[in-house]
Amino acid sequence: MEFFDLFREDRWPHMFCPGCGIGTVMNCFHRAFSEMNMDQDKTVFVSGIGCASRIIGYIRADSIHTTHGRALAVATGIKLANPDLNVIVFSGDGDIGAIGGNHFINAARRNVDISVFCINNYIYGMTGGQASTTTPYKSFSTTTPYGSKEYPFDLAEVAVASGANYVARWTIRNVKELTSSMTKAMQKKGFSFVEIASPCPTSFGRRNRMADPTQMFEWLKIIAVRKEKSQAWGLDQLDLNIEGRITIGEFIERNRSPYGLIA
Amino acid sequence: MRLPPGSYFMQGNEACVEGALWAGLTFYAGYPITPSTEIAEGLAMRMPEEGGTFLQMEDEIASISAIIGASWAGAKAMTATSGPGFSLMQESIGYAAMTETPIVIVDVMRGGPSTGLPTMVGQGDVMQAKYGSHGDYPVIALSPSSVQDMFDLTIRAFNLSERYRVPTMVLSDAEIGHMRGKFIVPRTLEIVNRRIRTDRVWHDGFAYDETLVPKMPIFGKGSRVHVTGLSHDIAGYPTSNVEVHEELVRRLQEKVERHSDDICSLVAHRPGSRRMLVSYGSPSFAAWEAMMQSEDVGLVDLKTLWPFPSKLLAQAISGSSDVIMIELNLGQMFREVQRVACDEGCRKVRLFSKVGGEVPRPAEIIGFLKEGG
């Protein structure tokens, strides 16, 4: 599948900033989707509000850009109204971790057969760089000018605890693993969740001495620790601060019956 | 199996359930809230029998979001709630209007504001139904005032919603919802299905004809449509072009206004009487009693609240010199009635208002009639 078989060429160029990680995610998704031979006409893309949510407007398929935080609830409605459809959600940390947090934990609990790709850029990018629920402790944003006083959510861990069937987290540096996880997520029956740590030099990096995209790439390299090593070191995303660490890897793969198929 | 034609004795909320199934409901999502809960409970039982989907969501925002998604997946979708839940749904009602998603919302009104009187009647949501979400957008709101109406108007709500692709509300209240009464399922019922399209919609997903209602592409049929709550052109693509925005918002409004003759309805008893009572929902019972016990008094029972049936009301009160609005709030629809009555040259327009909790007694209305001479 050529790139513009999947994406809407007539909407190019896209709106994303230079150095944004979303382009990489779209590339990885293109690879994963192409390899799977999924029926594009039977696949619906759903999103909420924010930078990551704008991806679906560029995809050449049925797509619905919903209200802030509600993507998972809308996706649940689509999937259960027509179970023949593949339902894929692109969303961000604001949608998933803050305004739509209730829908996130309940969609995972309900284990509806949808795949969620959450691009976590640790900031509200579209509104100009306010702190989100994943903004690292002590880091700066327009609403945390003295450094964030709150601890961030570990979205992947929340997904595991809430009952998702497949959960992984990668940074956009891990393109192979990310692509493979996207494939697994789409193949997996039930709720699957892939968190993608992504750079936002414009809104996050600029206020945290990483205005240059390459500095953000370096940061992602430093903070990301593979699960195997991470557990050995006892590191935890909850302690993420600007010098801290996040764990990456596949966190769970299980086969709880998806919603509606419980015998 | 649909309720066979015949005569039944049921609760208003139960009649709503049966009406929805007759209308072709295939997807329900809701969250429990008094006094609407019997609708969810009834559908939890009935939907699997009818091959549909019943879903209890985590809150009312999720409920309305789920039915919006289901509607785009081709379902006839509904949710039911009451005041606090209705407040939570407002953003998505605006979204449904903007994206022209046919959905039905049943609001069984209780005493407000806030948590208010959860088990008791009120009519405080009628302005919210029209103006609760931000921006200018169209809605259709119907007002049942009997168990029969709960059945009939639920079907009508689906029909209007499907025909005009507008979020449509059934503004019932705790008395009508919980009242038990007789209703009839007729042998034939008009059921409307949305006009759909299944072709690829590259650059005209929201193209419209003289009806102003675009044919709806359904997810999974190969249309590859993009839907967004952002201002969008006829392709469905987001735009910041002010002319396109203006055309869209005006067309959405005009879509309902142009068809208001089809949408609007009311029941007028003794139209043109010297004194005319105007009511909707549960106060209509007392108003009818008061009318029957008085000389030269008529009654208008509004069945459509939004768009406001100005033309029909004007005809019904033409020649009247005293118009009395009866409602269970501080006078929300009163201004609409006043506007129409003043345009008709009626000298006196009065408000009989109860805040809620109980319906007015006929004697109170008769007393009010006498006070004003």
Image (cartoon, coloured by chain):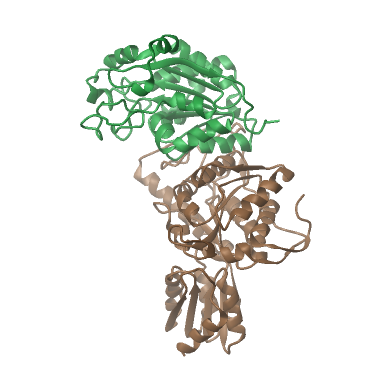
Q: Could you say which is closer to the camera, residue B176 or residue A4? A: B176
Asked if residue B5 lies left or right of residue A59, the reply is right
A212 or B223, which is in the foreground?
A212
- Shade of chain B as shown in the rendered figure: brown
Q: Residue at x 48, y 49 (%)?
A: B89
In the foreground, B111 or B226? B111
Q: Residue at x 61, y 30 (%)?
A: A85
**How far across and how far down the image is residue B81, in percent?**
54, 53
Residue A154 spot, x, y in % from top left: 41, 25
> Can you give x and y, in whole percent of width and height, for residue A223 in the image?
33, 15
Task: Report the number of discs.
Answer: 0
The residue closer to the viewer here, B116 or B73, is: B116
Quadrant of residue A40 within the rendered picture = top right
Rendered shade, chain A: green
Q: Residue at x 70, y 47 (%)?
A: B45
Relative placement, left or right, of A84 versus A175 is right
Residue A22, placed above or below residue B293:
above
Residue A1 visible in the displayed image: no
Where, by quadrant of the figure, is residue B136 drawn?
A: bottom left
**Visible residue check, residue B261:** yes
Indicate whether A89 appears above or below B218: above
Residue B191 locus on image (x, y percent): 68, 54
